[in-house]
Amino acid sequence: MDQKGIFRSIAERTGLSREESADVTRAVLEGLAAQLSEGEVRHLAVDLPAPLAAEFQSPNRRRPEAHPVAALDFIRQVSDRTGLKAVDARTGTSAVLRTLRETLGEEDYRHLLGQLPDEYATLGQAVV
């Protein structure tokens, strides 16, 4: 799926505008990259469209080890980055995780979740 396809998928799942969907997608990817180990970020970026992969792999987000954040704190961070209400940030985060699951495939998605707190798995399965 290309970048526009990802943004369109998020918009369809959430009811957010395409611009808001693009913002929430970038915020979630940036936030995930800050939590994941450098190796995991490199591994996952291979399956992302080039513009999103470049943002995902930004050098200022690289850490040798994972630094997970609780899901509620992460949703607050997404809300702060995007200016969306918390409920829209949660819905957007869930939609991005579900889209990542489809884009990455089950095995790579499990690797991503393996570096995050357990509540991310539930967040990624939420009905949007």
Image (cartoon, rainbow, N blue to C red):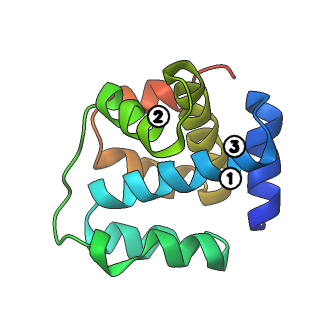
Alpha-carbon neighbours of circle 3 within 10 Å: few (<14), some, or many (≥20)? many
Q: Quadrant of residue 75?
A: top left
Q: 124 or 90, which lies in front?
A: 90
Query: What residue is pinned by disc 3?
Result: 20
Looking at the image, is mark 2 or mark 1 earlier in the sequence?
1
As shown in the figure, which amino acid type bears the numbered disc 3?
Glu
**Number of marks in the rendered image:** 3
As shown in the figure, which amino acid type bears the numbered disc 1?
Ala
Q: Quadrant of residue 43?
A: bottom left
Asked if 116 appears above or below 4 in the picture, the reply is above
Q: CA distance from mark 2 to mark 3?
A: 11 Å
Tag on residue 22?
A: 1
Indicate the position of residue 127 as horizontal and vertical percent values: 66, 19
Q: Quadrant of the C terminus?
A: top right
Q: Residue at x 59, y 45 (%)?
A: 24
Query: What residue is pinned by disc 2?
Result: 79
Indicate the position of residue 90 as horizontal and vertical percent values: 52, 26
Indicate the position of residue 30 as horizontal and vertical percent values: 43, 58
Mark 2 falls on what kind of element? helix
As shown in the figure, which amino acid type bears the numbered disc 2?
Ser
Asked if 37 appears above or below 96 in the picture, the reply is below
Looking at the image, is mark 2 or mark 3 earlier in the sequence?
3
Q: Is residue 110 visible?
A: yes
Q: CA distance from mark 2 to mark 1?
A: 13 Å
Q: Is residue 100 visible?
A: no
Q: Are marks 1 and 3 in contact (CB under 8 Å)?
A: yes
Q: Quadrant of the N terminus?
A: bottom right
Q: Residue at x 74, y 65 (%)?
A: 3
Alpha-carbon neighbours of circle 1 within 10 Å: few (<14), some, or many (≥20)? many
Tag on residue 62?
A: none
Q: Are marks 2 and 3 in contact (CB under 8 Å)?
A: no
